[in-house]
Amino acid sequence: MSDAPDRTIVGLTPRATPDLSRMQARNRPIPPAEEPPAAGKSTVEPAKAASAVKSQAVGRMRAAKQAPQAVAGPNDRVNAYVSPDLHERAKATFKATRHLEGDISWSQYVERAILAETQRREAEHNAGQAYPSSGTRLSAGRPLK
């Protein structure tokens, strides 16, 4: 029995520790949001202005995520119907630009799109102020005419 070769248990090598920095984003402090420029007094090039508006929207989105919500939790599910063409176009855009825009997930991409349209409508119809929330559910289906 002493002539038996040494036996060792061999298995898979341990996995490398994954990068957890994206999972800890909610624990990071929120940078202060910049004030929007006065309407009609911008001498900035359109590309720079769009970049500034985008960075302001991201700052507001981060602040909105941290603000307590009376009716809904921070991870509410949103269901909406969109045409298959638009859905495929949006998914293709997300996949092609997520690394350029810093999108962590599809949900963040959709949230940014909703935030941008919401801010546009508030600026156009309510002097940039948020509309008060009634806390009630939206009516289902198409509106009756």
Image (cartoon, grey):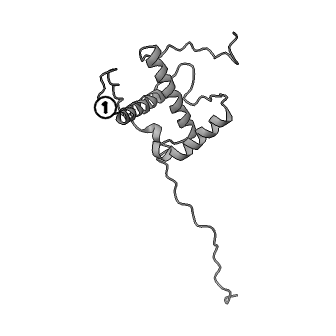
Which residue is located at x 34 percent, y 29 percent?
A: 34
Q: Quadrant of residue 77?
A: top right
Task: Please give the count of numbered marks on the rendered protein.
Answer: 1
Q: Taking 96 as reference, is 59 above or below it?
A: above
Q: Quadrant of residue 7?
A: bottom right
Residue 72 image point, x, y percent: 57, 23
Q: Taking 94 as reference, is 17 above or below it?
A: below
Q: On the picture, is 107 further left or further right than 129?
A: right
> For the residue marked with disc 1, what is the amino acid?
Val
Element marked by disc 1: loop
User: Which residue has dot 1 on it?
Assistant: 44
Residue 129 image point, x, y percent: 43, 16
Residue 122 image point, x, y percent: 46, 18
Q: Nearer the viewer, residue 20 or 63?
A: 63
| Label 1 CA crowd tier, 10 Å (few <14, some 14–19, many 20+) | few
Which residue is located at x 67 percent, y 32 percent?
A: 83
Q: On the picture, is 30 further left or further right than 87?
A: left
Which residue is located at x 50 percent, y 44 percent?
A: 97
Which residue is located at x 53 percent, y 37 percent?
A: 109
Residue 66 image point, x, y percent: 46, 29
Q: Residue furthest top?
A: 145
In which quadrant will I find the N terminus? bottom right
